[in-house]
Amino acid sequence: MSETTIAVELQGVTKRFGDVVAVDDIDLTVADGEFFSLLGPSGCGKTTTLRMIAGLELPSQGSLSIHGEEMGLRPPNKRPVNTVFQSYALFPHMDVRTNIGFGLEMRKVDKDERSDLIDWAVSLVEMDGMEQRKPNQLSGGQQQRVALARALVNRPEVLLLDEPLGALDLKLRQQMQTELKNLQREVGITFIYVTHDQEEAVTMSDRIGVMHEGRLLQIDTPEAIYERPITRFVADFIGRTNFLEATVASGDEVVLTNGDRLRVPTSHPEGTAIAVTVRPERLTVHGRGQAPEGSHRLDGVVDSAVYLGNAVTYSVSVDWMHLEIRCPASLAGDRRSPGDDVTVSFDPDHTSVVIG
């Protein structure tokens, strides 16, 4: 972050509502031109954080700056940001073009310049030919495009998006995820995106901040958060995983509940109770005793096998827990059945140590 321009910076920011701490002493920097997502369950503080950046809420303590300027008590309309909400908030009596240009008109932008900017925004979100339609004549996805165009036409330094795709059906939401990321790359504006949808955050973001109970638990790239979570909550919230309970034996070895020793680097002190997390797709099912040398092996019995089209998901009981395993359907010729004695293998390099 030191070699890039910082668009938004929060230092020691806390927000209280009476006795409730909604955001608890968070530090955050978002780089200029970055697509950054705040991800977490409902009530974790992500929307409150977004609203503080927008100026719709003021921090109880801490500092918040945009491109190096402290925002302090600066009102929303004096901040270089725009916000897109899940509800779209379009004016029902205005057509597409008038909705998009509303902010420009309020700022008394010259009529010719305003027209050019609206043309640019309409084309940007691919709404050409629909400029005269009212919101009730548009689909949900089209309304979302108009809301985006209305925000982008003002050329904000930072665009804030609060669950903007939440009201769309799954197929349209997935389509809009791709469009939104492409749009962000094209305009080059910093996007700060709030969502509770893990797939959405992983698909679009340059970096993700995972929030829980008002705190930022981990900030990293989607790949790093998925492959190397640092807390049990993050590992469990981002996709599915298996937790192998263990105790730290040394700096590079842990002891699993069943007594097996596993070489996994960890900075936690000897004797610390931890969990080793292994993603389902990192596990492989073999006939009993047929796992390759060099892998870690656990013997068990298949409880269930579920065909999912592109994959088969197994539940396997080992002597102290159940494992979830996801295998490509291309390996269907080696399919296992409930009751089969199997050996499950995994590479220790594909595991992470978590606490909490």
Image (cartoon, helix red, strand yellow):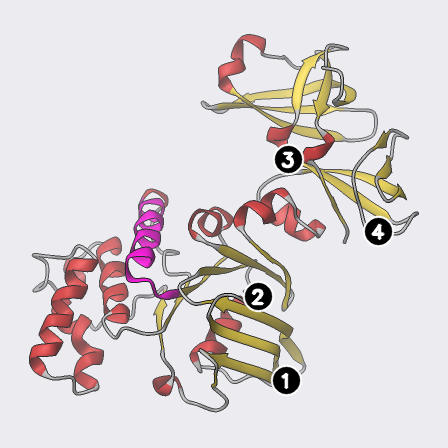
In terms of secondary structure, where does tag 4 sit? loop
SS of the residue at dot 2? loop
Please say if the residues under marks 3 and 2 sit with CB atoms less than 8 Å apart: no
Q: Quadrant of residue 102?
A: bottom left
Secondary-structure class at tag 1? loop
Determine whether the residue tagged by mark 3 lies in a helix, strand or loop.
Answer: loop
Label 3 sits on residue: 279
Left-right relation of 273 to 91: right
Please give the residue where the numbered disc 4 appears in the rendered image: 268
Q: Is residue 14 above or below residue 100?
A: below
Residue 111: quadrant of the picture: bottom left
- Picture coordinates of residue 293, whole percent (x, y): 76, 16
Q: In the image, which disc is placed on residue 43?
A: 2
Distance from Cα at disc 4 to Cα at disc 2? 30 Å
Marks 1, 4: nearer the viewer: 4
Looking at the rendered structure, the kind of residue marked 1 is Gly
Contact? badges 1 and 4 (CB < 8 Å):
no
Q: Is residue 252 magenta?
A: no
- Front residue of 246 and 269: 269
Query: Percent x, y for residue 338?
Result: 66, 15
Looking at the image, can residue 95 be seen?
no
Viewer can see residue 262: yes
Q: Amino acid at mark 3?
A: Arg
What residue is pinned by disc 1? Answer: 18
Q: State which region is magenta.
A: 172-190
Quarter of the image with the N terminus is bottom right
Distance between mark 3 and mark 2 Cα atoms: 27 Å
Q: What is the C-alpha distance between the residues marked 2 and 1?
A: 16 Å
In space, the residues marked 3 and 4 are separated at their CA atoms by 21 Å
* Position of 110 relative to 86 (above/below): below
